Amino acid sequence: MTGILTVETVLCRAADVPEGGALRVERDDGPPLAVFHVGGRFYVTDDTCTHGEASLAEGEIDAEELLVECPWHSGAFDLATGAPCGAPCTIALRVHRFELRGGDIVLVP
């Protein structure tokens, strides 16, 4: 019987992501991700804006609306769902599953 291999990746320490901020995480096996820390909760998304090549970890975070604004064209995305919330962005941002384990943010399949 053959089992399914699952790969989990430690992205960063939770303490490395300041409250109200974000951290860009480069990976060998995929596109860069952004880890956001807003209102005591974490969110993990693709880091690259779907409208251009901007890093969303460098964008402005709206903690009340739970949005990140692209630093290039001011398009915005919902951190929890990835839904585009402001022009010119129309394509959803990929949101990734993760777990907080022993102080680490761990990407899970």
Image: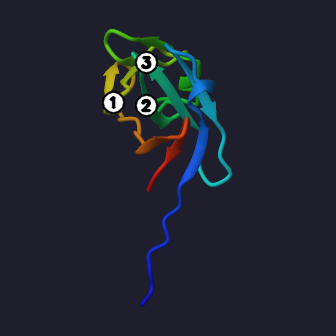
Q: In the rendering, at what x and y percent does residue 73 appear? A: 49, 16
Q: What's the residue at 39%, 15% (across, down)?
A: 39
Where residue 40 sits, quadrant-wise, is top left
- The residue wearing badge 2 is 43
Query: Label 1 sits on what residue type?
Result: Ala
Q: What's the residue at 43%, 31% (across, down)?
A: 43
Q: Is residue 15 left or right of residue 3?
A: right
Query: Label 3 sits on what residue type?
Result: Val
Q: Is residue 46 left or right of residue 29?
A: left
**Relative vertical location of residue 61 with respect to residue 17 in this rendering, above or below:** above
**Relative vertical location of residue 18 with respect to residue 34 in this rendering, above or below:** above
- Residue 38 — which label? 3
Q: Earlier in the sequence, mark 1 or mark 3?
A: 3
What is the quadrant of the N terminus in the image?
bottom left
Q: Earlier in the sequence, mark 2 or mark 1?
A: 2
Q: What's the residue at 33%, 30% (across, down)?
A: 80
- The residue wearing badge 1 is 80
